[in-house]
Amino acid sequence: MSITVFRTAVIHTGDESRPRAQAVAVENGQIVAIGSDSEVRAAAGPAAELVDLPGAAVLPGIYDAHIHTAQYAQGLVTVDLGGTRSLAEALARVADRAARLRPGEWLLGGRWNSNVWDPPVQPDRYALDAVCPDNPVALPNIDAHTTWVNSAALRIVGIDAATPDPVGGQIVRDERGEPTGILRENATHPLRPYTAADDLGALLRTGQEKLLALGITSLHDIDGDDCWQAYRRLHADGQLKIRVHKAIRLEHFEAAVAEGRRTGQGDDWLRTGPLKVFSDGALGSHTCHTSAPMAGGGHGIEVVPYPDLVRIYRTAAEAGIAVATHAIGDRANHLVLDAYEEVGPTPGLRNRIEHAQHLRPADVARMARLGIVASMQPVHCTSDLDLVDDLLAGHDLASYAWRGLLDAGAPLAFGSDAPVEDPNPFAALYAAVTRTRPGGEPAGGWQPGQRITMAEAVRAHTAGSAYAAGEESRKGVLAPGMLADFIAVDTDPYAESPEAVLRTQVLTTVVGGTVAWERS
């Protein structure tokens, strides 16, 4: 194949040995030369095709280390309750969607957040029954750890007053013992057969276009085996345009081991990722596992008991599968580190904690000592800071401790957790550097000692995510031998203010040396 030379005024390579360049030569999807325009054109030869990239700068392709692409894609065609400010507003959106359903069709969607409603009431099935009495409804909240269902949905999945709470889950009940329509953590599992998309492949194709438009060239997907199979079909059909490191959900773990799946198997487009395990819930659902009680009482939910964590980790290590464990509360994070330490080193595998939101201060250094990757989502900090102040006031915690983790030597990888948050990586960079909301609140940043630099934030969202996947020899920096994945943007994040970076527009996304998306 011929060589293509991409040129622009500023290329931030992410490579410490040569941090800036003006041209990059690509052959067979890989970078073969990078440097000044004259150097690269000389190396590429006179027959090379020249492509001038628009914008203020070129960056390595963004790598989202934690995203639910099936849920994100489904959210594009279901009812979105994100941003609703009251129960009445949420119900109005549900009613509008219900009017367009076929008989028996499930009404899906979600992203409601009762913590910000006025008033902040916990919804119930009777409210849904009033606007959608006949069709079953299942609506996960914004953190996806609580699902709001109507009476029809409860009947279909067989949950009633006599149904016991599952291990690691809760069926919320009224004073008579009747289910209210709020299901937490593992109590939502019976809904899964009814909430899968009919044509997930088509939705993922749409979703990947939107992610490419945000500059995302690689991702760690955290959804289920239906998503794995859909990505395999897209890849086989030549329709996969974004690189996927696909996690294994715990419910598919035994089957995956029996199939011989191992972390890292696959090619540069689609690889098997880590096993995803939940150790606790989420702060917004009051189900994160904490050492001290949260305001209002309760220590959250231990979704997977500690002995089971150890057993699962050992089985995964023996099978050659890395582990990515969801942990938000400080007790959950502590137990996960205990379990990783008890199992011992896993050569060749990068074990991770997903979110790692609230750590005991001593566990920051321990995480670094154990080499556990902190897979974190900066916008969670700025979205949840009021909840942290309300529910965890007085707790001795290192919360969203990006600075502390980096200083201790812990590997840091950034992602979005979309659709819980917007997948826009420039919002993540802004949050990481400022620890403020887009409007600049709170002034000076929330717990500003944990801010990091823009260069550190970009690295966490590129090379850091590649390291978490064991792909640092292929992705994350622009250097000879690396995959030719990069983006042209209208704002240079190294030269402009965080506020300008927040407004960044991607102009061109190149994956494997091919323009995969460009702004019209």
Image (spheres, grey):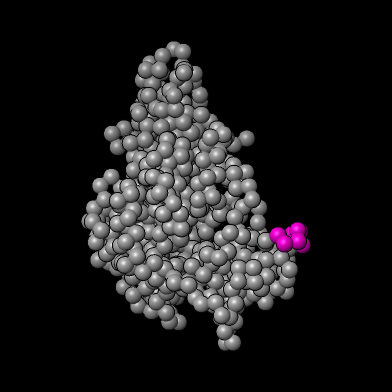
| 452 in relation to 306, above or below | above
Q: Is residue 510 visible?
A: yes
Q: Would residue 412 appear left or right of 155 to someone viewing this image?
A: left
Where does residue 226 sit, x and y in percent of width and height?
54, 50
User: Outermost residue toward the bottom?
Assistant: 175
In the image, is residue 11 part of the stretch drawn in magenta? no
Where does residue 25 sit, x and y in percent of width and height?
42, 24
Where does residue 413 sit, x and y in percent of width and height?
37, 50
| 287 in relation to 35, above or below | below
Q: Residue at (74%, 59%) from the top-left corner?
A: 101
User: Outermost residue toward the top?
Assistant: 46
| 264 in relation to 421, above or below | above
In the image, which residues are magenta?
99-105
Q: Would residue 289 appear left or right of 489 to someone viewing this image?
A: left
Q: Is residue 412 visible?
A: no
Q: Residue at (43%, 35%) from the top-left corner?
A: 268
Q: Nearer the viewer, residue 507 or 226?
A: 226
Q: Residue at (34%, 53%) from the top-left corner?
A: 316
